[in-house]
Image: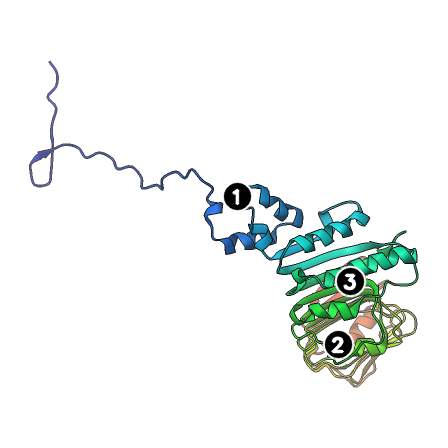
Amino acid sequence: MTAAKTKRRTPDGTAGRRPRKRARDLPSPSHGDLISDLPDAILGSIISLLPTKDGARTQAISRRWCPLWRSAPLNLDAHDICLNKFKLSSIVSSILRDHPGPARRFSFNHIRLHKPKKKLAEDAAQIESWFFSSCLRNLQELDISFEFWGGLHASVDHYQLPLPSMIRLAPTLLVARIGMCKLPSDIAAPSLNFPLLRKLTLWLVSISEEAMDVLLSACHVLEALFLQDIHDVGCLHISSPTLRIISFSATLLGREELVVDDVPRLERLLCQGVDGETIQVNKAPKLKVLGPLSPHVSKIKIANLVFQGRIRPSLGHSICTMNILALKFSGPDLNAVLGVLNCFPCLEKLYVIVSANFVCFRC
């Protein structure tokens, strides 16, 4: 005999069948590409974040992707496009010619230049044509440097940057990094204007004192200035109502001087590898981070406080705004450290760098 099947009763007492389990409410499987269903604006942002070579390759994915690279903001980084540096310039010219823009970023470091005058003139004409490209009309980030055939120091003379042509990019630039070139000394002050530039880096650049003054006065919202190996400057004076960070590394060669004249918003003054120079800070009432100070610097003067030789500060003066200070020594020098502490009564952090090692103290 088979056992009688018991019927399941409902809450009202009537018999009923056991309800079937409901399938989970999952989306129906898609037979297409979910990423391709995104709006063009989002896809364009994704493409602009890719390396240049990968961004261009997205044209081969499908018909949907084919026109996107040309309409996406161009992020042109020439670093990984081609190993042949002489062919690389022609490839960059081709990209700027084919892409209608706008370009968000243009990065091309160590642009290879020929030494013979005729070839150099052809290279210069090609570089100048880039700045006239409609693709770079609304450029936001510029990172560019040059080198002659034979290596970094193959020639004492620097390639002169075509500044009158580069000024076409100035109205929209937010970040600029320029290296291994010479800026013309006859910069016309009225025509030079960087209304949006917030970060400027100059490295291995030859520039006169007058040209530097004109350049800084043309940057109306500049917040960070990074200088490395600046040539042909006897005394570098810096004045800016907007600068918050000044960083320099082996900037002044020989017995030369860096003078921070009037930078009312300056908060960080960073120096690396400075040897034999004089640093003078006349007016920086909000300076909070300084260093590393080194005994190799001939003289450091901050307001009325003077450090000279083995960082023995003048007595009777102090700076109460300083929160973070870094000192650099070739060997232990406790007396110098204690002498410096007396001049900065409000320090919160002190970094003492001895050769390759450093110790952090919380004050």
**Mark 2 belongs to which amino acid?**
Leu
Q: Earlier in the sequence, mark 2 or mark 3?
A: 3
Tag 1–tag 3 contact (CB < 8 Å): no
**Mark 3 belongs to which amino acid?**
Glu
Q: Is residue 255 left or right of residue 204?
A: right
Q: Earlier in the sequence, mark 1 or mark 3?
A: 1
Q: Is residue 187 above or below residue 66?
A: below
Mark 2 is surrounded, within 10 Å at the Cα level, by few (under 14), some (14 to 19) or many (20 or more) other residues, namely: some
**Residue 324 lies in what quarter of the image?**
bottom right
Kindly identify the residue that appears in the image at 81 percent across and 66 percent down.
Answer: 161
Tag 2–tag 3 contact (CB < 8 Å): no
Task: Please state, as top left, top right, bottom left or bottom right, where the C terminus lies in the image.
Answer: bottom right
- Which residue position is annotated with label 1? 63
Q: Earlier in the sequence, mark 1 or mark 2?
A: 1
Q: Secondary structure at mark 2?
A: helix
Kindly identify the residue that appears in the image at 79 percent across and 71 percent down.
Answer: 337
